[in-house]
Image (spheres, rainbow, N blue to C red):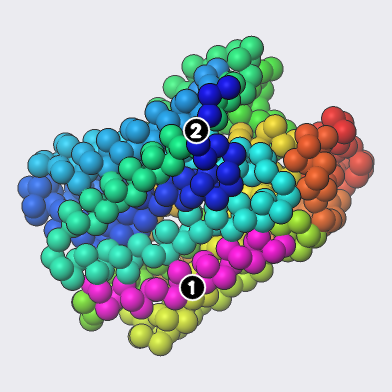
Amino acid sequence: MRQGPLAGRYPAVAGMVLLALIPYLALSAALEPITPIIGEQLHASAQTMSLGGGLSNAAYAVGTVLAVALAQHYPQRRMLLIYAALLVVGSILAAAATGAAMFITGRVIQGLCTSLLLIAAVPPLALGYPTSKLKMTATIMNMCIFGAVAAGPAIGGLQAQADGWRPLFWITAAIALAALALAVLTFEDAPPADPDSPRDPLALILAAVGCVAAFFGSSQLTSHAFLDPIVIVPLIGGLATIVVLVVYQAMSRNPLLTIREMLTSTIPVAGIVLALLAAAASVSATALTAAAMAEEYGPLHLGLLYLPELGGAVITAFALGIVITRKSIQYLPLIGMVFLAAGIAVFRIEVPSNEALTLVGSFLTGIGLGASVAPALFVAGFALRATNLQRVFAIVELFRAVAAFMIAPIFAHLALNVSGGLDEGVGIVLWIGFALAILGGIVPVVLYWLGGARPEAPDVEGFLAGEGPGYFSPRLLARLRNSPHEGRTVTEGAR
């Protein structure tokens, strides 16, 4: 088996994952203050820039499904090298763009390759090393996804203050190149996950059509009304197509995604619901509150006001590493929803928020996001076999991308078009976000009760060894079925 000089060395492999995920996620959060500068220099309208953002986010969502499909039939580490190389190409295209088409192409490649790398690299990192390393993997993953996003506003504000954007994009291209170098150095040829499994082009088509249509429709809200055909038709049609994908995979005898196992088991469903509501609720607590304050503060000052969010993300990243082998991992997402609701409530005290409230609110929302989505993902993953972890990551990230990236422009459109003006609109959206956060704490608890599920420490050793799920998850709504132990056929039958 061909190997790189650093193959199997956890620090190098973890560093590769960290560098591979940072560029796109950090840029996505940093773009808000520099998008007008990019549009002016590339002679692109606000609608064109919005379309580019929507297509790149759609590519990220589609990549979650594509990564699973490719992993089944092609050597996974070889594919990872291809993904990392394409990420470098996309980053260079965006940084060197001379026009809107070149810039959007680069951003789409970045979005696609980031999710491909996430699904291809993180599960093997979690499963291929001892339990002690799993704690660090959880911390790294949380830092990659939420730490990078939390740092985005400050990074974007710093670049906007300098009235530029290319240096930031060239830095991300250099980071992507470093990720490619580590991917080569840590190369360890691995076979396909399941080469005998049937191919499922229909699932890929449904995912691509649904995500592209939905994100295209939401991106058109920059210059169109919500009920305009160019918005509502692709938006509703895309969401309907994603629902068809879920139903198709749930009914398929040989599904690409483990939809049936997840959606018929209590703990995975509770985790998915919590992650989706957390992603949707957080939209109102970041971009929109910053928009309401944009006239009072410069981009750098405004970005620094949201820097405590990074501190909250760092704290919860280490907290996840500490509790991942304990029963308390199942309580951490609920704690996160409490903090997220509290952060949104602080922002709602005064719109636009003042400096003190913004610092407190951003810190609380940083803790809330970091303690909710990634922990919920691991909680859902432990309820299924380790061999399904890649698919679990793909499903949760697909749903999270739709919930977070697509809802953002819808909330922004609502805030801008309220008759009372932007401040009143932001206040209304904050109430919506607060309600979603509260629901995100209540619904999973109700699902646990209706399913008869009880929080317990995961059997991590058995999970990593492939002996079975980390803990028992009853069937969904098992109490209503009058059979609390019916779910053992779902999650413990393979033990």
Q: Give percent across and percent down for residue 361.
A: 47, 77
Residue in the picture at 49% in, 16% down: 201
Residue 315 lies in magenta, yes or no?
A: yes
Residue 437, can we see it?
A: no
**Amino acid identity at mark 1:** Gly
At numbered mark 1, what does the secondary structure look like: helix, strand or loop?
helix
Mark nearest the camera among 2 and 1 is: 2
> Which labelled disc corresponds to residue 161?
none
Q: Give the quadrant of the N terminus.
A: top right
**Amino acid identity at mark 2:** Gly
Q: Give percent across and percent down for residue 76.
A: 53, 27
Magenta stretch, residue numbers:
299-323
Residue 317, can we see it?
A: yes
Residue in the picture at 42% in, 49% down: 19
Residue in the picture at 72% in, 37% down: 386
What is the C-alpha distance between the residues marked 2 and 1? Answer: 35 Å
> Which labelled disc corresponds to residue 4?
2
Residues packed near mark 2 inside 10 Å, few (<14), some (14 to 19) or many (20 plus): some
Q: Relative to residue 58, is residue 275 drawn left or right? A: right
Q: Give percent across and percent down for residue 124.
A: 61, 38
Quadrant in the rendering for residue 418:
bottom left
At numbered mark 2, what does the secondary structure look like: helix, strand or loop?
loop
Q: Give percent across and percent down for residue 439.
A: 62, 61
Mark earlier in primary sequence (2, 1):
2
User: Along the line of sight, which residue is nearer the eye, 303 or 166?
Assistant: 166
Please name the predominant secondary structure of the magenta segment in the image: helix
Vertical arrangement, residue 132 with respect to residue 229, above or below? below
